[in-house]
Image (spheres, rainbow, N blue to C red):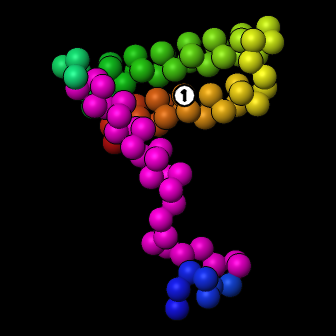
């Protein structure tokens, strides 16, 4: 049985989710960038600093949308990308 044979209400446990894979790659890129600067997101203060930086990015995007520099849809798309910073901070604190 392949995934084409499954009923619509079944989600295969081991299917490849391309979006999830890309998000994981982005999360790993965050750590790689920090490592290039002799830092790591496994450090509590470094992870906290990344979270603050992502909050600033979110505020900047909110302001850009409020002043019609970007659309609401663009803001949402950019926030989705920026969210990987929060996810990276969380991932390496586990």
Along the line of sight, which residue is nearer the eye, 75 or 91? 75
Residue 65 in the image, given as x and y percentages of width and height: 76, 16
Q: Residue at x 32, y 20 (%)?
A: 46
The quarter of the rendered structure image containing the C terminus is top left
Q: Residue at x 52, y 20 (%)?
A: 54
Q: Residue at x 22, y 22 (%)?
A: 36
The verdict on residue 30 being magenta is yes
Q: Residue at x 64, y 13 (%)?
A: 59
Compared to 76, does 91 lie above or below?
Answer: below
Task: Determine the main secondary structure of the stretch shown in magenta.
Answer: helix
User: Is residue 22 toward the left or the right of residue 80 in the image?
Assistant: left
Along the line of sight, which residue is nearer the eye, 48 or 21? 21
User: Is residue 92 toward the left or the right of residue 79 in the image?
Assistant: left
Residue 85 in the image, given as x and y percentages of width and height: 46, 29
Compared to 12, does 51 lie above or below?
Answer: above
Residue at far bottom of view: 1
Q: Is residue 72 visible?
A: yes
Along the line of sight, which residue is nearer the eye, 1 or 59? 1
User: Is residue 14 toward the left or the right of residue 29 in the image?
Assistant: right
Q: Which residues are magenta?
A: 8-35
Residue at far left of view: 38
User: Is residue 63 toward the left or the right of residue 92 in the image?
Assistant: right
Q: Which residue is mark 1?
A: 82
Compared to 58, does 14 lie above or below?
Answer: below
SS category of the residue bearing label 1: helix
The verdict on residue 69 being magenta is no
């Amino acid at each position: 049985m392949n995934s084409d044979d499954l009923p619509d209400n079944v989600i295969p446990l081991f299917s490849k989710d391309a979006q999830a894979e890309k998000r994981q790659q982005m999360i790993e890129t965050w750590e790689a960038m920090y490592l290039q600067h002799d830092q790591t997101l496994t450090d509590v203060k470094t992870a906290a600093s990344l979270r603050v930086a992502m909050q600033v990015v979110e505020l900047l995007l909110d302001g850009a949308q409020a002043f019609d520099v970007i659309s609401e849809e663009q803001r949402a798309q950019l926030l989705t990308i920026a969210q990987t910073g929060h996810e990276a901070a969380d991932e390496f604190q586990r």
